[in-house]
Image (cartoon, grey):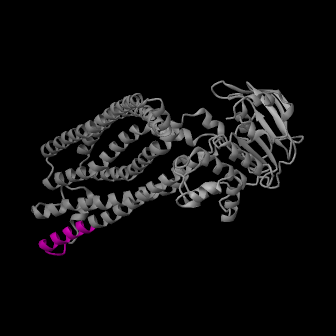
Amino acid sequence: MRRRILPFVPLVAGLGLLASLLEGAGIGLLVPLLALMLDETASTNMPGPLRAAATLFSGVSLQQRTILFGAAIIGLILLKNVVQAANDCLLVSLKARIGRDLRNGLAKSLLSVDYPFFLAQDTARLTRIVSTDSWFVIEAAAAALAVIPAVTALVVFSVLLALLNLKLFLLVLVGAAVVLGTVYLFERRQRRFSHEFTASSQLLWQRHLTLLQAPRTIRLFGQQRREQQRAADAIERLWQSLRATSYVNAIVNPTVDALIALVFLTLLLVGFWSGMTVPAITAFLLLLTRAQPHAKTISRARIGIAAYEGSMREVDWLLSQDVPAAAAPDHDLRLDRPIAFDNVSFAYPNGTRALDQATLTIAPGATTALLGKSGSGKTTLVNLLCRLIEPQAGEIRLGDAPIGPIDSASWRRRIAVAGQDSDLVNGTVAENIAYGRPEATAAEIEAVARAAGAETFIAALPQGFDTPVGSQGLNLSGGQRQRIGVARALLLNPDLLIFDEATNAVDALSDMEIVKLATEHRHFQTLLIISHRKTTIAACQHGIVLHDGKIVEAGPLSDLAYFRSMAGRADG
């Protein structure tokens, strides 16, 4: 992003310099104009450049010279405003470009990091960075860009002020040092408040995400009042932080204005006592007045950037995440050989050991059941199969070859998962079914919906396949969401299809129909089913049983003690 903005910095500085030169020249011409109007001699008390300007239009009458000087001043000011408008438009364009590139960069970073990154991070923090901190960073970047023309303007006005009266200019420098020192003190306080604001904002995001993501749980357990209090506490903490930041912003401007007013009064008195002419004092103070907004721009930018420092650190942290190097895509990859786990272990960032030296084989073309109680490691095994996470010990092989060197994206293209949660995205039923293959035809979408037992309920929806599913599919029942998830997986025609509790919200009869259709192998080659329901796994040929992350049984399904013990349990 910086590389794309840097080429424009000289242009911003150049336009700012030109605008300041034009404005300074226009103000400089006021000295001979005022001298003419006051009938004063223009040569003795003026710097060289102004004495030369005073001789302009010397061949015409006093009235005509006055008019010409006035016209020249107006022309210079108008031209300055044209240049200033062009520079302002450029700054607006650069701010928009920064915003676009920053958000693209954040999206790219979130899509490029490994899946384990999300296991270790707070969702509220990531949400806040993308939705809130990014805006603050854009504002900070805009403030930094605005400093460039402001600095060039101050340089121009400083030169002009030094030419008019060096002693007064040195006095201005002393006043500027006092103002800058005061701004620095405010800047330090604002930087400290910025980090507190960032922490408070993240806490409030956590509370709001809970309200949005767990409305059913909150109401089922009657925790509305508790969640209201937790949200109120987070809001209070954020308000206290915001108030402290606002107080600094409210105090700094009057303080700086008071200091500047004191400098102006001092300059006026010193200029008068030193014998400066009225035109010279007027021009000096007018130049200083025109320099004041640029000085304020720099002060406000410094305070603003300090206030956004916490957000800038957060955004920079997310953008600087390591992106794993991808192997070359393998478009000819097929999962047509046994997939073997050899002493594979994996533990989550919180220390929970999910798999412990697991050794198993998934035969190609077969239907295998993965069994075990909740928390036994089944979902972790699926994540390893899908290359969302990688083994921390041991090895996974395709046939005799380790899968590590294989491009993970190419690997995942040969796998489809219909999960227990069946995460749906905002969009229509058809868009969700075709999520993995956006180019799929309507006929293909309808075929897999029929295979998943979803065609009947979809036809009954208000807009059929064009019915919006709502946020996270909440417009549909759990069984409807899962049927759509099954259809979405079948549409990919994967080598390996994984049903991860994919039918636990479906009634038993529909469950049997879905498994029957799926096991016809019309849409996949190999099937791995994770379920606690005997009707779901009854058609499987093989079984693998997990307990506390270890493989305790494996072989023909009917030979497994775990499967036989399921006969006495109520399905579901």
Residue sitting nearer the eye, 135 or 111: 111
- Residue bounds of the magenta highlight: 58-75
**Residue at 13% across, 46% down:** 272
To which quarter of the image does residue 96 belong? bottom left
Residue at 73% across, 49% down: 513
Above or below for 189 versus 469: above
Q: Position of residue 564 (x, y in %)?
A: 81, 29
Relative side of 554 to 440, left or right: right
Q: Quadrant of residue 238?
A: top left
Where residue 321 sits in the image (x, y, percent)? 61, 40
Predominant SS along the magenta part = helix
Q: Nearer the viewer, residue 284 or 201?
A: 201
Q: Is residue 35 left or right of residue 135?
A: left
Percent x, y of residue 230 = 40, 29
Front in this rendered view, residue 483 or 459: 459
Q: Is residue 70 magenta?
A: yes
